[in-house]
Every structure is written in C-alpha cells, then in structure tokens.
C-alpha cells in the first residue's frame, strides 16, 4: 500500500482563496478598480473564473473579503488578539486618541490599503448591499471602539456629561476620512493631532 496521503481539499481551497485575495488586492493597486475584472483576478491567481463565481457574486465582493482578510492579518502581525478591538486607556484621553488617529493616518497613506479602501468606498456608494456589508464588517466596529473610549472618559468626568459618544466619534474620524477621500489636504500626524485638540476643546466639561 502507498503511504502517500490524499490531497486535502480544505487546504487546496484555502490556498486558492489566498491566491484570489492576493490577486484582487494587487490588481486594484496596480491598475485601479475599473480595470480589475474577475477574469483578471482568476488569471493572476491561477484559478478558473468559475471558481471565483462559486464563492463570490462579483469582483466587489471578492475585494471586500480580500480587504477584510488583509486587515485581520495586519492586526495579527501587530500582536492584536482575535476580537481585541479597544482603544488604549492610559488615563490620558488626548494621548490615546492621538495615538490611534496617527495609526489611522499611516494606514490610509499605505498603498496596500489606499486603493482597495477607495474602491470599496466608491462601490459601496452605488451598491447598497455592498456598502452595508462594508460598514457592518469594518467601519461600524471601528466607530464603536472610539465611542466606548469616549463613554469611559465621560464616566470619568473627563468630557462633558452631555456628550453624545457617537457624535464625538464622528467629530474625530469624519474630517480625517473626508480629507483622505477628497484629497483636500495632506493627511499627516500633525493634522490628526489638531483634530484631537479641536474636538476635545468642544467636549471639555463645562
């Protein structure tokens, strides 16, 4: 009898998915979303087009899953445990917010994230289903993390008790994403710090 093991379909499937993710992210970065096609992704990944359509209904769906996978891997490389999505709480709200907004600036300026994020934001604006999934899977958890940190600061008396944590969160991240999306100015650590300073002046206890 041969000792050779039969191929593991699950491992082969995972390799194919990884190849598809890598191909989708690379093509969007290299050629732009409009020129990226399912056929191109399949050719780059070395899989059949029907393999992609068996798992995803569109190139946008492929890109979203690829981006979520990229984000999860980046978090793991940074040492974050699964489900670990809390802002640091050093007792200094301003310092904690500056730290996280600076990291957000670095991510948005990173070519690995810039093109896919822009593509998903644009596609989500015209595809309500994709937009809802993008928001639920990626944006909403991030917003809730900020809101929980502001709630903790409110409970500790460090921001005005009338503060709405969700609106306060949007005061911080909204301008950052507006500047990035519309390229209205440079996206820098200094800008992130200024956002924190301006927002916290408005949120200070009366």
Image: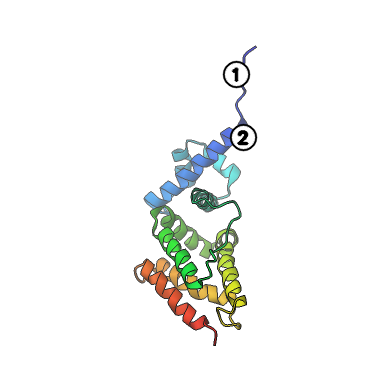
- Residue 110 placement (x, y as % from top left): 39, 56
Is 158 drawn above or below residue 49 in the view shown? below
Q: Determine the residue positioned at 42% across, 56% down.
A: 115
**Distance from label 2 to label 1 (Cα)?**
17 Å
Is 103 drawn above or below residue 45 in the view shown? below
- Residue 196 placement (x, y as % from top left): 45, 74
Which element is circle 1 on? loop
Closer to us: 56 or 111: 111
Which element is circle 2 on? helix
Checking the image for residue 157, the label placed there is: none
- Residue 158 placement (x, y as % from top left): 55, 78
Q: Determine the residue positioned at 56% across, 59% down.
A: 138
**Which of the two discs, 2 and 1, labels the residue nearer the N terminus?**
1
Is 15 drawn above or below residue 71 in the view shown? above
Q: Determine the residue positioned at 57% across, 38% down.
A: 14
Quadrant of image for the N terminus: top right
Furthest-top residue in this view:
1
Classify mark 1: residues with Cα within 10 Å, few (<14), some (14-19) or many (20+).
few
Furthest-right residue in this view:
1
- Residue 12 placement (x, y as % from top left): 57, 33
Q: Is residue 178 left or right of residue 186?
A: right
Quadrant of image for the C terminus: bottom right
| Disc 2: which residue | 10
The image quarter in which residue 189 lies = bottom left
- Is the Cβ of the residue at disc 2 closer than 8 Å to that at disc 1? no
Q: Determine the residue positioned at 42% across, 51% down.
A: 28
Q: How many marks?
A: 2
| Disc 1: which residue | 4
């Amino acid at each position: 009898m041969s000792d050779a093991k039969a191929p593991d379909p699950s491992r082969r499937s995972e390799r194919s998915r990884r190849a598809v993710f890598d191909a989708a992210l690379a093509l969007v970065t290299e050629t732009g979303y409009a020129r990226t096609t399912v056929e191109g992704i399949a050719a780059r990944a070395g899989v059949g087009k029907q393999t992609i359509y068996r798992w995803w209904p569109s190139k946008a769906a492929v890109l979203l899953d690829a981006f979520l996978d990229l984000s999860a891997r980046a978090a793991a490389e940074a040492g974050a445990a699964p489900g670990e999505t809390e802002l640091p709480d050093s007792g200094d709200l301003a310092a904690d917010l500056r730290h996280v907004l600076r990291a957000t600036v670095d991510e948005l300026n990173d070519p690995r994230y810039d093109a896919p994020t822009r593509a998903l934001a644009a596609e989500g604006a015209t595809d309500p289903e994709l937009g809802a999934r993008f928001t639920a899977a990626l944006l909403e958890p991030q917003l809730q993390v900020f809101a929980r940190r502001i709630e903790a600061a409110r409970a500790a008396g460090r921001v005005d008790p009338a503060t709405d944590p969700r609106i306060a969160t949007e005061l911080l991240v909204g301008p950052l994403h507006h500047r990035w999306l519309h390229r209205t100015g440079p996206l820098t650590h200094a800008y992130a710090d200024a956002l924190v300073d301006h927002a916290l002046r408005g949120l200070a206890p009366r």
